[in-house]
Amino acid sequence: MNLVVLTGRIGAQPEIRTLNSGDKVANFSLATEERWRDRQSGEKKSRTTWHRVVTYAPGTVKFLEEYVDKGDLIQVVGMLRNEAWEDAQGQKRQATKIAVTGAGHRVEKLASPRDEAAQGEAAPEPDLDDEIPF
């Protein structure tokens, strides 16, 4: 089974394009963050990973176009898709994307920065373990 679930923030407005067929496609970047406490120093650390997400699903494209903005917290359920191509200089390139295309795949908006600002101060971050769970 090829299924991936990511929760993160939209890095920029989703890019919506219309194909020659008239169908629309949406592409966007999603930032996920991993947090932990360094065993040696006790210092809190984090790492951000950027993911490219693509969807051709008409309802999902419309949702992204109308309701999702840069900075929104969303959850994506999709599948990994590896793509390979040759660039203008003849170099072979490849990329892994999250494709939101099938049954059970979705994009769900969890919060926007303005929603979070309206709630006032955020709750304090939980104390993170030394252990990384993998």
Image: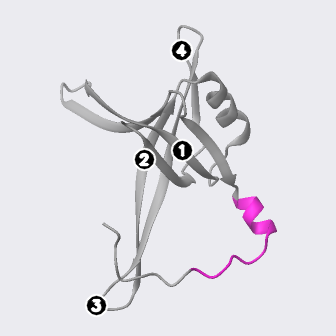
* SS for dot 2: strand
Above or below for 38 versus 111:
below
Q: Tell us which disc is closer to us: 4 or 2.
A: 2
* SS for dot 4: loop
Residue that numbered label 2 is attached to: 51
Which amino acid type is marked by label 3? Gln
Which amino acid type is marked by label 1? Val
Left-right relation of 19 to 73: left
Quote the CA–CA distance across marks 4 and 1.
23 Å
Which amino acid type is marked by label 2? His
Residues under numbered marks 4 and 1 in contact, where contact means CB atoms less than 8 Å apart: no
Mark closer to the chain start, 2 or 3: 3
Residue under the point 42% across and 40% down: 3
Mark closer to the chain start, 4 or 1: 4
Quote the CA–CA distance across marks 3 and 1.
34 Å
Residues under numbered marks 2 and 1 in contact, where contact means CB atoms less than 8 Å apart: yes
**Which image quadrant: the N terminus?**
top left
* SS for dot 3: loop
Q: Tell us which disc is closer to us: 3 or 4.
A: 3
Mark closer to the chain start, 4 or 2: 4
Q: Which residues are magenta?
A: 113-125
Quote the CA–CA distance across marks 2 and 3.
30 Å
Q: Tell us which disc is closer to us: 2 or 3.
A: 3
Quote the CA–CA distance across marks 4 and 2.
23 Å
Q: Position of residue 114 (x, y in %)?
A: 76, 60
Residue that numbered label 1 is attached to: 76
Above or below for 18 versus 106:
above
**Which image quadrant: the C terminus?**
bottom left
Residue that numbered label 3 is attached to: 40
Residue under the point 34% across and 78% down: 131
Residue under the point 18% across and 24% down: 90
